[in-house]
Image (cartoon, rainbow, N blue to C red):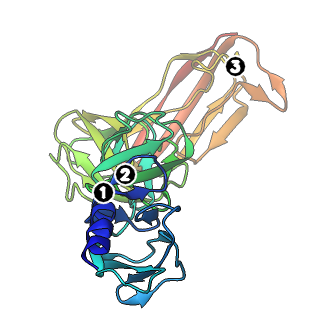
Amino acid sequence: MYKWSQHIIVWLLLLFSISSASAQIAMPDTVCVGITRVYQVNDASTPSTYTWKIGGVTQSSTTHSLTTTWNTAGVFLLTVQEHALNGCDGDIQSGLVVVNPLPIANAGNDVNVCAGKNIQLNGSGGAVYQWSPPTYLSNSTISNPSLVLPPLGTLTYSLMVTDANGCKALKLDTVLIHVLPSVKVFAGRDTFIAVNQPLQLNATDPDNAGFISYIWSPSFGLNNSLIKSPIAILNKDITYIVTATTADGCKATDDINIRIFLAPEIFVPNAFTPNHDGLNDLFRPVMVGIRELKYFVVYNRYGQEVYRTSTIGAGWDGMVKGQMQNTGSFVWAVEAIDYRGISVKKNGAVILIK
């Protein structure tokens, strides 16, 4: 009996083998979930049968070799007993097998990033990391690489992790990065106002980006610098910059220049060139501190009315009944109501230059 026991002990301790390699290992054994091992004692030429058990459960193999796949994490007792042809049973030999769980790769939540900005990925679940593809990543082998200036569109990154025990995650995890287009905000057209005349500012969202916050800078003269449409009361020229931010954190800026005059005024040019070059094509009054235009009218040298408007900002393009007028002098008159309710009247002459 003793010689059989000793014979099995030697082989059990020295010849437990790994299925994926020809090298042999001694007990106790350490594996990862999903690994298949081949354990054996003696050799195939020994005329004996064997009883293999894992955690007390008898296995199907009765040969000198046991092949098993470890599908459950934990610590298991592996035993084997030899049954010789002469009826003698060897001692039960045992060894512990530690089955480590597999790590779970976590690539983080899908995120939106603004065009022209970098973003940091946040992977977890392992000790060794591998992101793919490595394109635009500062380092594809760390948990939290930076995504550097990615292009517009949706990018997909996959993460595989390996833990400190050398166990590799069963599957990849992915994260979607949505790179959003640039956004724009419009602060308004540059303008003139009279000193201490209330001016309603209004930031607009031309591309419907969905801004959720606004900041005007400087805050001088504003009743509230943190709203879309503050009111400005000024005693000096100023340039305001508005910064608008979307729910995704994308920012846009624009500015507006405001020039201050000491009193309400109407400025009318003495010449214009309606040649459609985009420069001085319209003859119109520039009004400072005016809330209502009663009329702006233009007459030819015969006293005939050639243009009339009561719309602030509108002007004459030099056409009368579809015909461009010849170079010459024209007379104009204007009446408006300033922001204080006072009537302002002016008149003069202008030269049309073709």
Residue under pointer 3? 276
The amino acid pointed to by label 2 is Gln
Contact between labelled residues 1 and 2, with CB atoms less than 8 Å apart: yes
Mark 2 burial class by Cα count in 10 Å: few <14, some 14-19, many 20+: some
The relative height of residue 66 versus residue 182 in the rendered view (above or below) is below
Instruction: Report, in whole angstroms, how far the alpha carbon at label 2 lies from the one at label 1.
Output: 7 Å
Q: In the image, which is nearer the foreground, mark 3 or mark 2?
A: 2
Q: What percent of the width, then of the height, locates residue 167?
A: 36, 58
- The Cα atoms of the two marked residues, 1 and 3, are separated by 97 Å
The disc label shown at residue 24, or none: 2
Residue at the spot of label 1: 14
Residue 74, labelled with which disc?
A: none
Q: Nearer the viewer, mark 1 or mark 3?
A: 1
- Cβ atoms under marks 1 and 3 closer than 8 Å: no
As shown in the figure, which amino acid type bears the numbered disc 3? His
44, 325: nearer the viewer: 44
Is 226 on the left-hand or right-hand side of 162? Answer: left
The answer to whether 236 appears left or right of 33 in the picture is left
Q: Is residue 332 above or below residue 198?
A: above
Front-most of residues 284 and 209: 209
Percent of width and height locating residue 244: 35, 50
Q: Amino acid at mark 1?
A: Leu
The quadrant holding residue 330 is top right
Give the structural element (helix, strand or loop) at label 2: strand
**Above/below status of 337 relative to 318:** below
The picture quadrant where one finds residue 284 is top right
Q: Position of residue 299 (x, y in %)?
A: 66, 29
Q: Is residue 197 visible?
A: no
